[in-house]
Amino acid sequence: MDSLITAAARALAAGDPFGALNRVALRNDPSALALRGIAMAQLGDLPRAKALLQKAARAFGPREAVARARCVVAEAEIALVSRDLGWPAKALETAQATLEAHGDRVNAAHARNLEIRRLVLIGRLDDAERAIAAFDPAPLPPALRAAHELIVAGLAIRRLQTKPARAAFARAATAAHEANIAPLMAEIESAALVMDAPAARLIWRGEERQLRLEDVETLLASDVVVVDACRNIVREGGANGGAVVSLATRPVLFALARALGEASPGDVPRSTLLARAFRAKHADESHRARLRVEVGRLRAELRSLVEVKATKQGFALVPRGAREIVVLAPPVEDEHATVLALLADGEAWSSSALALALGASARTVQRALDELAAAGKVQSFGRGPARRWMTPPVVRFPTSLLLPGPLPSD
């Protein structure tokens, strides 16, 4: 490797893409193409970066397997940043194996880091936790170690483990300062703001108040029954987590549970329940009959947690024992809140990546995006397969409780 290539690589490692381009911008040999691709990625021109890396990978000879594998790892990182979650994960696994076989521990560890990051993005939290437990970040230089700690923090946030999340953010900040890369330090500071931003609303006895993530964690550890409108479940609080009843696929039952939970310990008139659950403006006998059926189903679903009792006016939700019933709702209600939750990270997502992360069909996600765009809540750029979606620059609320993947005890 010649001196210009070495100097350009050092500049990239220090977060100086212009310094790297000054040395290799006019060169077209494979090593220079790869470094130019990484520099363009650091500058935000991801399509150009991807093209340069692919060209470099094709140009490396049959004896340069390590160099080709490094290009694949860099391309995988670009795919994650551009939220191309359909990028073939098998290619990254093959590249990682090649790097490990040739003793390149740093880039092999980086490839593993990217794999864990993808698992977190698509909500496979259990797999991500197992991968982190078996992962040794020691070979990583400070900049990559900071990125790893951001992944650890993101996973802890989705698990509602705020102390480990704060600790991971602190380790990330220390590593970023050690690397002395200003954009990385700014990214970590921005990401850590989620810890002190409103994460949910608590509705209890007719009053509402905003909760931070730590408040939500405390609430779920207390001896209450939570009607969780962020995940459409009813759960029993407690330090070790209690019973959880998912109503995610039963929207009518959850609408009834939420209406009853918001009114607890009082009752809800039948007319109000008909309007909330069935959107019936003028109820007839068929609506009332259906309400009785659905309340019976709700009573059967929640029998381990609460009782659904009939009153003169309607129905009431009564906890078993001397516990309270509270409702946990998103800070801002929206019909397509889960789509906004993913887009709120500030990155540009493709509709196929959103569908993969949410476990929904591409057609469903595209309809949601079209409706959100018509309302001015999201914006797109590009055409065809290159089309990407993102939220406007000002994000309204953090999204941890709406992101894919179960919380503990779900």
Image (cartoon, helix red, strand yellow):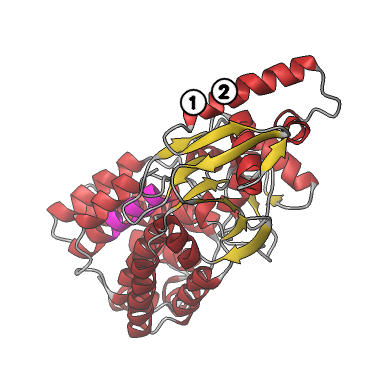
Residue 403 % position (x, y): 50, 50
In the picture, measured across the screen, residue 224 lies left or right of residue 93, that is right
- Give yes or no for contact between labels 1 and 2 (Cβ–Cβ under 8 Å): yes
Which of the two residues, 336 or 39, is positioned nearer the viewer here?
336
Residue 268 in the magenta stretch? The answer is: no
Residue 352, placed above or below residue 74? above
Range of residues picked out in magenta: 110-120
Q: Can residue 112 be found in the magenta stretch?
A: yes
Determine if residue 320 is in view: yes
- Compared with 165, 366 (above or below) is above
- Taking the view exactly as shown, the residue that stands out farthest to the front is 312
Q: Secondary structure at mark 1?
A: helix
By secondary structure, the bulk of the magenta-drawn segment is best described as helix
Spatial CA distance of label 1 from label 2 is: 6 Å
Q: Secondary structure at mark 2?
A: helix
Residue at 67% in and 48% down: 382
Q: Residues within 10 Å of mark 1 (few under 14, many from 20)?
A: few
402 to the left or right of 79: right
| Image quarter (top left, top right, bottom left or bottom right) of the C terminus | top left
Kind of residue indicated by mark 2: Gly
Residue in the picture at 66% in, 33% down? 311
Q: Is residue 113 above or below residue 177?
A: above
Q: Which disc, if any, is residue 300? A: 1
Q: Quadrant of the N terminus?
A: bottom left
Name the residue tied to disc 2.
Answer: 296
Tell how many labels: 2
**Residue 190 place in picture, x, y as percent:** 52, 73
